[in-house]
Image: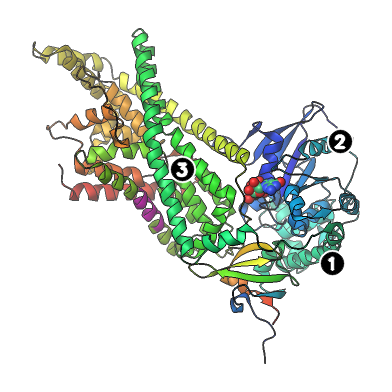
Amino acid sequence: MQRRYRTISELKINESALAIAVTDPALAGKLTAMGVLPGTRIELVRPAPFGNAYYIKVDGVRLALREEEAACILLEV
Amino acid sequence: MSDSPGKPLKVALLGNPNSGKSTVFNQLTGLRQKTGNFPGVTVDMKEGRLRFPSGFDATLIDLPGTYSLYPTSSDEKIVAAVLTNPKDHYYPDVLVYIADVTHLEKHMLLLTQLLDLGIPVLLALNMSDTAAEMGIKVNIERLAGQFHIPVVPISGRTGENIQKLLHELERVLKNGQPFGLGETAFYPLRDLEKQVVDDVRKKLGIENAYQALLLAHHHSWLPFLQKHERETLETIVRNKEFHSLRAQVDETLERYDRFTPIVRQTIQQAGNAPDTPTDRIDAVLTHRVGGPLIFFGVMLLVFMAIFFGYDTTGGWVENTTGALIDGLAASLNESWFSSLLTKGVLPGLQGVLVFVPQIALLFLLITILEEVGYMARAVFIFDKTMRRFGMNGRSIVALIGGGACAVPAIMGARTISNWKERLITVMVTPFISCSARIPVYLVLIPVALPTSSWWTKALIFGGMYFFGLSAALAAAYVFKKILRTSDPSFLALELPEYRMPHWKNVWLTVWEKVKAFIAGAGKIIFLISIALWILGNTGPDGALLEAENKVRAEAAPTTSKDELDDRVAAKKLEASYAGMLGKSIEPAIRPLGYDWKIGIALLSSFAAREVFNGTMYTIYSLESVGAQEEEEAADQSPFERYGRLRRQMTNDRFENGDRIYTFATGISLLIFYALAMQCMSTLAVVRRETGSWKWPVLQFLFMSGLAYLIAWLAYTLLPKI
Ligand SMILES: Nc1nc2c(ncn2[C@@H]2O[C@H](COP(=O)(O)OP(=O)(O)OP(=O)(O)O)[C@@H](O)[C@H]2O)c(=O)[nH]1
């Protein structure tokens, strides 16, 4: 079966995609409250210098997310 | 909401992080504010006085910033705990909600939650200066009409419309007419939520539906709930199979669905501003290689500013206050009071004053780094590194802040949501060399290395910071291995737009912190120096007189008067209660190379380490200064400070004639002061932040134990020259 989504770690730098869902309920509460919602456009700005985190933009707002946090945001292919 | 006398009206400020809340708070209150920063003051939040144009007053409370009423960290929990409990001391009569109008959608979530709680809300659209520049237009009437609340566009930065906000607030407070959505909630409860809410309302007698819902969500931790209330809620949630996390997400999404169209109808965007300076700056500051390098560069600059800043300011303060004390001593008649003043209290206070410019400078630099938005980048860069040591990226803010003073730094750790990460941060931050250690280091380094070059001493000084940081990380690593938690851990951090610092904010923050520091440290030092003076000048029946007579009787007739006075003073100190106390612990500290005088300083330093210099001054000024006291030469480096004190220390000897302050003793003392937990204020704040005595006690024991062990090793291994 083919996957119908990708995640932030699969984006190229400066590439963006629409979010379709936020999965992990423990993280989703926090992320949705910060504006990471299905339907918002997410852009990868750059990975953190020592890895393990991403600098992203969500509708013009800049966020730093850990790998696990980024992984629960499903993006459109 | 009528102004019933005796009960001052309360207004609270609330908003998302970075909405400009603190800036607006400062605009509204100026210097009429206080922070419950130090132990002894029970308030946790910033409070200020609001003075309305027509003359009446209200209390303004600055609540911590949060994105929603579903908190993940303990500072966010404060907000939910206050607003779900109408009996809370801080529960506001009116809430001023600060929203960043340039990202209005994101700020509506919390606003609609507040409306559903039925709290009267006044919406302040902040950053309207930036909005104007970006060509954003807001239909204020329409927005106000949709939510039935007053809306005022303001700018915390330019002060625009702050007066209007006050007027509007006064009108609302005086008229007291109900506003907001009234009975109709913004968020329609789902079936399951309705059942839960109905149960909660019935069993707990709560009127507001959303309040009831929040109680069900947060029943496990809300501090004001009685035991039976908690159990009732627990039962309801279990019986209804109410899944809090899932319900939170659903509610949030539903709210967004409802307010997004409203916001889009009221706001006109002039198209997105494409490339802001922030993107270009971040391309450098969060760069893979450049980012960390620049961070270390910035830290090095801060460190150099401390060191060289001390050269000018610390020396100046020491010389001026020293001259003042000497002048005062000369002009007063000799009495117990003048002695208490000029040889006890004032030299003690001088010990604190000497590094006030230093701590102010540090607070200033740190505040600027926060205010421009750089700290968030440091958190982002070092999150992974900090996690290796069981902490959170946010811990770096506490560790940097610990370089000024551990007390506010530890309170700042509240933004860390994971209990274990936060606890570790709280436990190891005091290892970072705080500004109270600077004068101690500056006295002791030249004592240990009297003949070394200036830059060797500077290197050792820098090494002390490195040593403290290493100890902090090592201890954190050990805690990481021991502690267990199931708390979720977050980075999820907003990286704010870079902004020029708003200087009013900066000055007020620095002023607040320095004031709290002087009040906290000053009080302790004042008491300790009085206690020390009394202990040093009294003794068991007639012991002091006996000691004096003995010295005078035994002295050869050729002894000069000065020398005789010196010997008398030394023997009197030895015979005093302070001397007895020092002697009683001498056996325990002798293995570290310390004598009973250092013992006295050590004992008093457990209240606050900055007492060391003060105590040393007091102890050594109990002896006459001696006629041979040379004039201080024009000083070349910070290490030339405290010359008088240091000369007396270096000449001091053990009973067997060995010099006390050898290389080994100096290093051993330096290590002890770098590692030991010698600060009551820190212990008190750790007690408050962790909610139990267990952690401060453990912290005291392991830090001081480690200090003893390593100091002993150093003294044993190093040459006693
Ligand atoms: N241009 C502009 N900048 C503002 C305004 N109000 C605040 N700022 C800036 O926005 C930044 C954040 O302001 P703060 O007052 O610290 O925000 P806060 O909501 O208290 O943030 P936290 O302390 O993180 O909760 C600072 O750099 C302010 O100088 C405003 O009206 N216009």
SS at badge 2: helix
In the image, residue B138 sits, relative to residue B503, either above or below, namely below
In the image, residue B117 sits, relative to residue B362, either above or below, namely below
Residue on which the image places disc 3: B404
Q: Which residues are magenta?
A: B465-473
Residue B296: which numbered mark, if any? none
Distance between the Cα atoms at labels 1 and 3? 50 Å
Residue B468 part of the magenta segment: yes
Which residue in the rendered view is the most extreme toward the bottom? A1
Point 24% across, 37% down: residue: B447
Q: Overall secondary structure of the magenta stretch?
A: helix
Name the foreground residue: B573 vs B290.
B290
Q: Which callout, 1 or 2, points to the residue nearer the camera? A: 2
Residue B171: which numbered mark, if any? 2
Distance between the Cα atoms at labels 3 and 2? 43 Å
Amino acid type of the residue that numbered disc 3 sits on in the rendered structure: Ala
Residue on which the image places disc 1: B190
Amino acid type of the residue that numbered disc 1 sits on in the rendered structure: Arg
Q: Chain of mark 2?
A: B
Q: Is residue B82 left or right of residue B282?
A: right
